[in-house]
Amino acid sequence: MGTFNFPVPPIKRRFSTSGRIRTMVVLVLSAFLAILGSITFTTSASWNKTSSHLNAHPSTSVTRHTAAPTPIPTQIPIRKPAPSSTKAPVHTPVLAYPLFYGNTHLPEVALTFDDGPNPFYTPQVLTVLQQYGIKATFFDVGYLVADYPNIVRQEYHQGNLVGNHSWSHPELTLLSATAILSQITSTSNAIKAAIGVRPTFFRPPYGAMNHIVLAEANYLGDTTVLWDASAGDWKLPGVKVIVSTILHYIHNGSIILLHDGGGNRAQTVAALPILITTLENRGYTFVTIQQLVDDLAAPAVSNSPSSGTTFSTATISETVAWRRETLA
Ligand code: ZN
C-alpha cells in the first residue's frame, strides 16, 4: 500500500482533451485496482498471520484466532505444519484422518509397540528387532520417557521410530481440548529432550479419539496412527493366540499393535520372533510408520472409504467404536 507511483504531470502535458479523458479513466481504473489490491493484501496478510499463529510452537496457554468466522467443517482439512526449529523435519504432510493401515498394494507391514518404555521388556523387544534386522515404531508414554530416557535413546539409535502416546495414558475423549493439548505437547517435549527429535506421529491411548483429539494432534503437527491388526496381547491370551490372531488380520500395509509396557509382556516378547519369521516367509517386509506413510504416495491407493485425503468425522467415530470393541 502507498507504493503506487503515477507519472501524472508528464501525461497531462503530452495528451489532448480526449487523451485527458482517457488518462482520467486510466487513473480512476488504477485507483480502483489499487484499492482492490490493498484489500486483497490485507486479507492475505491477516490469513498469513492466522496461519503462522496456528502453526506456531504450541503451549498449553494457546489462544485461538477467531477473527474469521468459519463454518463447522463436516470434513477435516489437511493442514501442513509450518517449519519450526523445535520440530523434526516433516517428510510428509500431516494426515488429517487417522491412519489404520498403509498402502494395500505393497507387501509391507509396521510393527508398533505401545505403553513403553519399560525397563524390563523394551530392551528384550529391541534385542529381537536387532536380531532380525527389523525397524519398528514405539508409541511411548510421556512420563515413562522422562523416567527412562536411555531406553528411548536406544529405540531411536537402533533406527526405530519414536511416537507419542500421551503423557499419562488417559482416555483423551474425556478431557478438555487444553488438557489434550498438554498431554501431547509434554510428551513430545520429553521425547525431544531424550533423542533430540520431535515426534510427528501420535497414537491416542485405547485408540479413543474424537474430532477434538484429532484436531489437537494435527494442530501440533502430528498424524494420528491407529492399527488394523491386534491380538489383545496385553490381556495375556497366550503366545499361540497372539500369533494366530495377528496373522488372521494381516494384509498389505497392516499396522500391528503390540505392547512393550503397561504390565507383563513376556508373551509379546515370545510371540515376536514367530510373528517376524512367519510374516517374512509370507513375503512381507517390516517398515516404520514413517515409511508406511511415505509409501502412501504410490498411485491408486484409497486409504479410507470416502477418499484418500479426507475422512469424515462420523466415519471416524463409528470405525473407532468398532475397533475398540473388537480389537483394543
Ligand atoms: Zn496404550
Image (cartoon, rainbow, N blue to C red):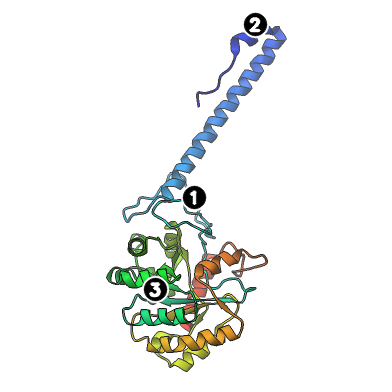
In percent of the image, x 33 and y 54: which residue is there? 59
Mark 1–mark 3 Cα distance, whole angstroms, equals 30 Å
Where does the C terminus fall, quadrant-wise?
A: bottom left
Q: Quadrant of residue 250?
A: bottom right
- SS at badge 3: helix
- Between 49 and 21, the residue placed more toward the observer is 49
- Between 301 and 113, the residue placed more toward the observer is 113
Disc number lying in front (2 or 1) = 2
Q: Is mark 3 within 8 Å of ligand 1?
A: yes
Q: Quadrant of residue 102?
A: bottom right
Q: Which residue is mark 3?
A: 205
Q: Which residue is mark 2?
A: 13
Mark 3 or mark 2: whose residue is earlier in sequence: 2
Q: Which residue is mark 1?
A: 70
In percent of the image, x 69 and y 15: which residue is there? 22
- Between 244 and 135, the residue placed more toward the observer is 135
Q: Residues within 10 Å of mark 2 (few under 14, many from 20)?
A: few
Give amino acid for label 3: Pro
Compared to residue 21, the image places residue 56 above or below, namely below
